[in-house]
Image (spheres, rainbow, N blue to C red):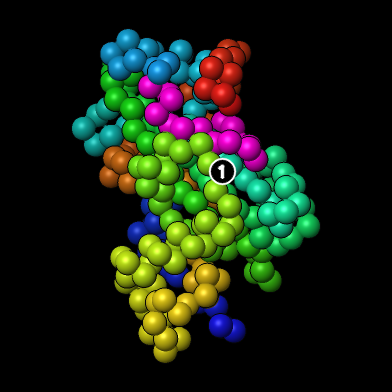
Amino acid sequence: MFKKIALVLGLLGSVLMFTGCTTANTTRDDKMLDVSRVEKFVAKGTTNLSEVRELIGTPGITGKTIDGKDFVGFAVVGKQSGGEEAGKFAASVLTFGIVDDDESRYTQKNVFFVLDDNKTVQDIKYDGYVYLSQKNFTGFVSLCQRRLSDEELRSTTNYSKDYIINSWKKYVTEVKPADVVAVAQKEKTTIDKLDYDDVEYPDFGFPAYLQISAHNLFGDYTNEELNSVSGRQDKDGSKKALLGL
């Protein structure tokens, strides 16, 4: 369809503050992290925050739940720029270094650790998103934005453009989210007739998907800091190889 419709996600727009810059713990164009692998190296009630940082890196986000529990979050981001056949890769998530196309695909998996007063891990939670990032005349927008399923979080696949598009079409057709229904009605068509680029979402980018995931998992929270805990420490990420990162 010729006219593209931008969705205004009021809730997300009201809770996200874009202050400062952060980098993903890992940006990759090959196999992704199966998040359950983290549990092979992080034991609830035993592993402390320093050991988690050695395993994954500097936290991308920290905060405190409404019931007073501290948490830290990390991101593993899969990116592919340009055409699928080109296999070209740009390392920066924030600058969106588009190589030879105006569209990139992303898989972002976010891992959160809930800590006790001694900075020992009490719980582990996972969340994530797939989406396409596209440059247009006004900047960047997201297409086919969708929250990852539990099965997808535990997959090592860095999802292809076709998969992201087709899985989004399946999701919106089955779930019929109100915002996409509104787009279809405005275009005088049905959801299943929408093209993948007829619906545009705000392009949050990293670290905002970490913030969105934090709200998904914890609801409202306080004391948010990005790239926090006094910044990078010497041993951060020194054991990433254990996770295959």
x then y, percent, for residue 179: 37, 71
Q: Residue at x 24, y 36 (%)?
A: 66
x then y, percent, for residue 33: 51, 32
Q: Residue at x 29, y 40 (%)?
A: 218
Q: Which residues are magenta?
A: 23-39
Q: Nearer the viewer, residue 87 or 19?
A: 87
Q: Is residue 23 above or below residue 10?
A: above
Q: Quadrant of the C terminus?
A: top right
Residue lying furthest bottom in this view? 188
Q: Nearer the viewer, residue 143 or 168?
A: 168
Q: Can see residue 231?
A: no
Q: Quadrant of the N terminus?
A: bottom right
Quick check: 225 left or right of 92? Answer: left
Quick check: 225 left or right of 4? Answer: left
Quick check: 212 left or right of 3? Answer: left
**Residue type at numbered disc 1:** Asn
Please give the residue where the numbered disc 1 appears in the rendered image. Answer: 158
Q: Is residue 176 above or below residue 226?
A: below
Q: Dot 1: what SS?
A: loop
Neighbourhood count class around disc 1 (C-alpha, 10 Å): few under 14, some 14–19, many 20 upward:
many
Residue 71: name its quadrant: top left
x then y, percent, for residue 190: 39, 82
